[in-house]
Amino acid sequence: MKEILALNAFDPRAGASFDGPLALELARRARAFGAASVLFYDRPLEFVRAEGCWLYDRDGVAYLDAYNNVPSVGHCHPHIVAAATRQLAALNIHNRYLHEGTLAFAEALLATLPPPLTNVTFTCTGSESNDLALRLAANFTSARGVIVTAAAYHGNTALATEVSPSSYRRGGPPPHVRVIPAPLCRNDSRPAAEVARRFAADVAAGIDALQRDGHGFAALLFDSIFSSDGVFAEPAGFLAPAVELAQRAGGLVIADEVQPGFGRTGAALWGFARHGIAPDIVTMGKPMGNGYPLAALVTRPEVLDAFCANVGYFNTFGGSPVAAAVGQAVLEVIAAEGLVANAAVVGAHLKRGLEVLGARHPAIAEVRGVGLYLGVELRAPAGQDVARFTSRVINELRERQVLIGAAGARGNVLKLRPPLCLSIAQAERLLTALDAVLATLPADA
């Protein structure tokens, strides 16, 4: 399996082939960041400003950002910039003081979620939210066992890394973490009921193994679009049997909404809503703050009460007045600009266009996903490594000023998750660029 940070990563050994300012900057970064430095692309990019779906380099060249779900409603959105600036100029402090903005944002966020999810805890990152969710689940169930999918990624704290199989370069998750296959959501004739049955069976097998080995069953943790596994979203509703089974077995269901949340699927604000399920804990991250470090966990009162009876929890920067102002502004932009509907319309247009390309280019094996989170699985020409082939496609798109990412256990899925404000015209630009890249590849791909 391909480690997540290795997908389309810059190889620092190639830096010696560069000269001038780029070579100097790469050397400075290597000295300062050491082995933890991760950059994209064979030839790394440096950006100096952004707007909407566009990123601009030092020479003023515009790149279409079809990768970044951090600025979810668009880079440098003026409404969000104004909200953050206004609040930063007035007050920014931790949330152990009363503040109307923090309370109003908490209430607005909770209003978007189904009961009984009525308690929110603010953090700064999705990793922190998932770390806390795992602690809540272990405390509430008196068990340690967690079930995740084969190439999942849920963050980079110690606990979150344990449940992120795609983060491992050597070894794998500890024994109390059971890894099951990603759901078999493919574009074939497999009935929806079969997808649901198979995934529920895999969850059941994981629960049995955890209980047999003495770990107990604490949580089923998933991102409902299975982004790191290669983007598996359909059919809507297939998660319900697995969720019901997990809850009957006494575990908590944690819906990681960092990837599918805040309107990304085009069906609702939350990815889990497409499946008609009721998670016990919902975690949120990057898109929540449109680039500002804002995240949260929402759960039932009894789950949070049980945890706080045993352990205190406080996050210095989570839920600060500035964080709340930014979060409120993001919700306002999503509503005012109709971005959930835009994700549905533009996402459907983009998916149809990708399917047309798939009929023309043998390199495209399958197109998957929903809304503005799509995956294009590639097949390589005979004798070529498929991950290297996929990286080549991504780098050639970069040369055409279009930015995308990669996903999947084999690193062979093009990952498309642009800001939710992507237009039809911008989707067409992406399609034109991908068509041109694939046209340059061998015919026997």
Image: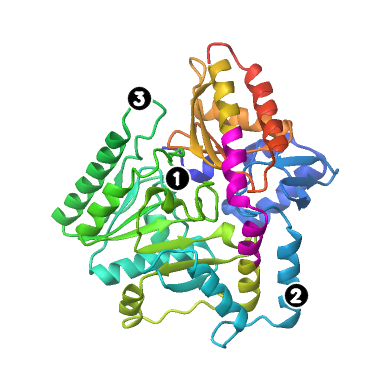
Question: Which residue has dot 1 on it?
Answer: 225
Q: Residue furthest bottom?
A: 97
Give the SS element for disc 3. Answer: loop
Q: Position of residue 226 (x, y in %)?
A: 43, 44
Q: Amino acid at mark 3?
A: Ser
Q: CA distance from mark 2 to mark 3?
A: 54 Å
- Between residue 79 and residue 231, name the one nearer to us: 79
Q: Is residue 9 visible?
A: no
Q: Amino acid at mark 1?
A: Ile
Q: Quadrant of the N terminus?
A: top left
Question: Which residue has dot 2 on it?
Answer: 86
The magenta stretch is 329-349
Q: Is residue 345 above or below residue 312?
A: above
Question: Which residue has dot 3 on it?
Answer: 189
**Among numbered discs 3 and 1, the one appearing first in the sequence:** 3
**Among numbered discs 1 and 2, the one appearing first in the sequence:** 2
Task: State the residue at coordinates (48%, 16%).
Answer: 383
